[in-house]
Image (cartoon, rainbow, N blue to C red):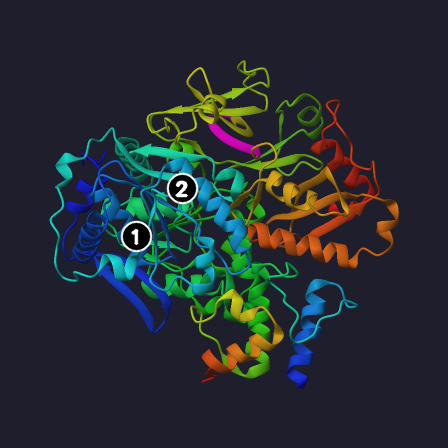
Amino acid sequence: MLEFANLVAALEAAPQNAEFVTFWVDEDERETVTFGEFRQRSSIQAGGLQEQGVSPGDRVVIIMPQAITAMTAFAATMMLRAVPAFLAYPNFKIDPAKYRSGLMGVTANLGAKAVVIDEDFPEEMLACIALGPDTKLIRAGNDLSTRLGIRVPVEGSDAIDPKSLAFIQHSAGTTGLQKGVALTHAAVLRQIGHLAEVLRIGSRDRIYSWLPLYHDMGLIACFMLPMLCHVPVVMQSSIDWVMQPQSLLQVISKTKCTVGWMPNFAFQFVPRRTPQKRWAHYDLSSLRLMINCSEPVRASSMNEFQNAFGIRQGVLQSSYAMAENVFAVTQSDIDAAGPRTVWVDAQPFRSAHRVVPLAQDTAGALSFTSSGRLLANQQIRIMRHSGEGARPDSVGEIAIRSDCLFKGYYNRPDLTAQAFADGWYRTGDLGFLLEGELYVVGRKKDLLIVGGENIYPQDIEEIVGTHTSIHDGRVIALGVYNPDLGTQDIVVVAEVERAELLNDTAELEQQIRSSVVAGLGFAVKSIILKPPKWIVKSTAGKAARSATKEKLMQEHPEFAGES
Amino acid sequence: MPSEAQEMIEHILQLLGKPAAKIDENTPLISSGLIDSMALVDLLVKLEELTHRRIPPGKVQPKDMDTVAKMFETAERVGKPRG
C-alpha cells in the first residue's frame, strides 16, 4: 500500500537524485530528469500558472506533444490544487474547425480556467484553439518560464485533500470528449497501490512506454505509477514509435527497461515491421513484464512477439483496465507462464451465451485468452441485458465495483446516471468468469478499438452522413478484425441517395475518406457504397448495426474475419 | 520525375492494393485518408532504401511524409548517410 496523503506528497517524497523520466528521441538524443529536477520544473510552472490566475479547484486543459514539459505542467497544476486534463494534440490531418469545436465543448464542460499549449504549437493550428470568455490560453514556454530559476512559493502538499479531484481523463473521439472521468487523489493512490503490489514493482524496475499521456495506459501505468512508486520511466512519442516500431526494441535493449504495457496489435506490429535479420540484434532480457491491455487479448499476437525476440515464459501477461476504474481491474498471474487460454463450445456460446469449456485445441471451438484475476478490492458481476446477475457459466455485461472506481463524469450527471446500476459501473463490455479469471469477449457495444484507441462509430457516421450524395442516417461504421495488424480496421457502409451514383464511386469514396480524416484524424480502411434501402433498419427506423454487419459479411466474405 | 519517386509511387499503389489508382508526386496520402499512420513505417523503410540514407526516428512527422515529393525532401533534410 502507498502511504502518501495525495499525489503531490508522493512526488515530494521521491529521492532528489533518483532518475525519473527519460524522453527518448534517438540514440544520440535523449533527455533524463531526476525526481528533484522534475519537481523543480513543476514548481516553476506552478508559479507561472498561479501568476496567470490559476487557483485551487480550477480545471486546466493541457495540449502538448508527448514531452517532459507536458508532464511537469500536469504536476504543476496538481501542486496548485487545480485539476489537470490532458487532451490529444491536434495532428496535421485534422480540420482545425473540427478540432476547435471539440475543444470548445471540452473546455465549456470543464469550465476550464486555462488551456496550456507548448511553445512550438504550430501557427497554422492556432486556429484549432477557441476559448470561452473565461478561459485563458497559456504557452508553456513563454508564459510559464519567464521567471526561470525563481521558485515561486506554492502551498505545500499538506493542503491537498485526498478526497478532492486529482485530474480528469477523457476517452478519445468527439463523442468520448463529453465523458471526462473525474478521479480523486485517494482513488489513484489506491489503484497504484494494488497494481504495484500485484506486479511487485520495486527499486530495480524501469518502465517503458510509447503510450500517449491522454490515454489511461500512458497516464496511469506509465506516468502516475513511476511517479508514486519512485521508479524511472523511459518514454518515446507514439508517433515516433509507430513510424519506426523497431525503436521499441532499441530503447528496451539500451535502457534495460523491465515493465511495459501495450495494446494487442503492438505485439505483432513490432515483429512484422522489424526485418527478421534484425530480430536477434536486440536484447530484451531485462524485460520481466510486458502487459497486453486495452484491446481484446489474442494469444497468437503474443506468441509472435515472444518467438521473434526470444522472450522468456511468463513475461507476456494481460490485464483488463479502464479509465473509469483509474486503470486495472484484473491482472494475469505474473508467476504463471502467461495468461490462460480456454476453448469453449461454439454452439451454446453463440445460441445461448453459455460457456462450455472443451479440451485444448478442440477443432471448431472458440478460444479466449484470460485477462487475469481481480486486483485487491475489486468486484466483478456478469449481468444480463435486463440488469439481473447472469448465471456463472454465461456471457454477459461486465459490471464492476471497487475502491478506486470513479464517482462520475465531470459535470455530466446524466451520463453518470446511465453508467451506474445499484452502485455497479456497467462497462458495456461483454465477458465471462471461469475459475476466478475474467475473459473479455467483446468490447463496449459499438465501440471500435483501433490500435488501442477508442473510436465511437457515431462520430464517423455523422461525418459521412453529411455528404450530399449519402443518405443521412443510413451509414454504419464497423470494426472488422484485421489478422495482419492484430487490430480492427474501420469499414464504412453507406447508402447513396440515388442508385445511379454507384456508377462511378472512386471520387465519392475519396471525398468520404478525406472528410473522415479531416474530422477525426484517422483513416477509414474500406468504404462500401450501397443502393438506397440496403442497410437493415431496426423497428424504430434506425440503422441496425449488427444486422447490417451480418448482411455485409454474407455479401462480402472478405470482411468475414473475426471481429 | 526521378525514377526513385516513380518507384515510390509504385510501392504505394501496391500497398493500397489499387494498381489503377492515380497518384503523382504531389498527391496527399495521409491527409486524404488514403494511407493510415500504421503504414508509415513501410513508407519510411522504402524511403531509406531508395535514398540510401538512414532517417532517424523523432526527426520525421507524418506531415513530412504526406506526398512523395515531401518524402524525398524530408530524406534530404534529416537523413544521415548510411554508415
Q: In this rendering, would A217 be left or right of B66?
A: left
**Horizontally, is A181 left or right of A389 in the view?**
left
Give percent across and percent down for residue A365.
Answer: 68, 34
- Residue type at tag 2: Thr
For marks 2 and 1, give the one nearer the viewer.
2
Categorize mark 2 by other alpha carbons within 10 Å: few (<14), some (14-19), many (20+).
many
Residue A170's disc number: none
| Viewer-closest of A324 and A245 | A324
Q: Quadrant of residue A89?
A: bottom left
The percent position of residue A261, horizontal first and vertical second, equals: 42, 48
Can residue A262 be seen in this snapshot? yes
In the image: residue A213, left or right of residue A101:
left
Dot 2 falls on a residue whose secondary structure is helix
Q: Quadrant of the image for the C terminus of chain A?
A: top right
Residue type of the residue flagged with mark 1: Met
Q: In the rendered view, tell whether residue A22 sits above or below residue A294.
A: below
- When the figure is inspected, residue A544 is found, relative to residue A423, above or below; the finding is below
Q: Chain of mark 2?
A: A
- Residue drawn at 66 percent across, 86 percent down: B2
Q: Which residues are magenta?
A: A434-442
Label 1 sits on residue: A71
Q: Percent position (x, y) of residue A288?
A: 36, 51
Image spot of residue B34 (x, y percent):
66, 61
Q: Which residue is mark 2?
A: A107
Above or below, comparing residue A504 to residue A54 in the picture: below
Discs 2, 1: same chain: yes
Camera-nearest residue between A46 and A53: A53
